[in-house]
Image (spheres, helix red, strand yellow):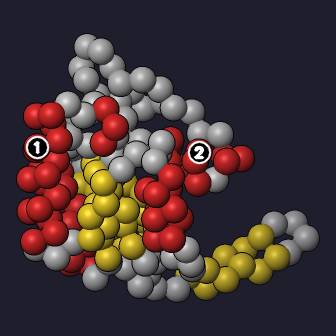
């Protein structure tokens, strides 16, 4: 949060307030640098998938640890339920049971399920929410459903790598 002095020639930031909280992303390289990707948020909706693309426990746990450190509520949305086979649905049940058992709110659904859409709208109501997850898990698709005029580009999962393509 900042205060801005609006001047004729330019705008000037006069005060920068301290962040209430933030979420970091560590650099992939060996520099040991970190980047703040969001601040002053109420919650994180972490969108994860069992396949197309697969989200690992490690990725989920890193996000949950960051949220715990900074006192940010984390909600897990297990997305793309409608495309899973029997084996993937069994794995999904294991993931959901595990994270519920340790106290996290978990949702299972897809953008094609009206109940899920209603629940997500309710979760977002009057909250500053970071939408997070791997490329290809459905973040942009969810934004298009929730904010119809936003028109975020979406794409198919890479056939070669079975991951999102950063459209």
Query: Nearer the N terminus, badge 1 or badge 2?
Result: 1
Q: Which residue is mark 1?
A: 90
121 left or right of 164?
Answer: right
Q: Residues within 10 Å of mark 1 (few under 14, many from 20)?
A: few
Residue 38, x across and y down, in percent: 43, 65
**Residue at image location 57% in from the left, 33% down from the top:** 153
Residue furthest toward the top? 160
**Residue at image location 32% in from the left, 77% down from the top:** 72
Image quarter where the N terminus lies is: bottom right
On residue 144, which mark appears?
A: 2
Residue furthest toward the right? 8
Q: Which of the 4 image quadrants contains residue 137?
A: top left
Query: From the viewer's perspective, is residue 89 above or below residue 34?
Result: above
Q: Which of the 4 image quadrants contains residue 146?
A: bottom right
Query: From the viewer's perspective, is residue 87 above or below residue 57?
Result: above
96 left or right of 143?
Answer: left
48 left or right of 111?
Answer: left
Q: Nearer the viewer, residue 157 or 1?
A: 157
Element carrying mark 2:
helix
**Residue at image location 61% in from the left, 80% down from the top:** 2
Q: Nearer the viewer, residue 137 or 72?
A: 137
Query: From the viewer's perspective, is residue 15 above or below residue 13?
Result: below
- Contact, mark 1 vs mark 2 (Cβ under 8 Å): no
Residue 61, x across and y down, in percent: 14, 60
Q: Nearer the viewer, residue 24 or 132?
A: 132
The alpha-carbon separation of the residues under discs 1 and 2 comes to: 29 Å
Disc tally is: 2
């Amino acid at each position: 949060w900042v205060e801005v002095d609006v001047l004729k020639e330019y705008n000037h930031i006069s005060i920068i307030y301290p962040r209430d909280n933030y979420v970091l992303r560590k650099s992939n390289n060996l520099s040991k640098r970190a980047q703040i990707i969001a601040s002053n948020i109420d919650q994180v909706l972490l969108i994860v998938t069992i396949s197309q693309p697969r989200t690992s426990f490690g990725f989920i746990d890193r996000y949950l640890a960051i949220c715990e450190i900074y006192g940010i509520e984390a909600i897990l949305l297990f997305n793309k339920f409608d495309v899973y086979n029997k084996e993937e649905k069994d794995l999904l049940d294991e993931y959901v049971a595990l994270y519920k058992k340790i106290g996290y709110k978990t949702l299972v659904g897809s953008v094609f399920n009206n109940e899920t859409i209603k629940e997500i709208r309710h979760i977002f109501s009057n909250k500053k929410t970071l939408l997070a997850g791997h490329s290809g898990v459905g973040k942009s698709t969810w934004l298009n459903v929730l904010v119809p005029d936003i028109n975020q580009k979406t794409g198919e999962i890479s056939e070669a790598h079975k991951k999102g393509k950063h459209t």
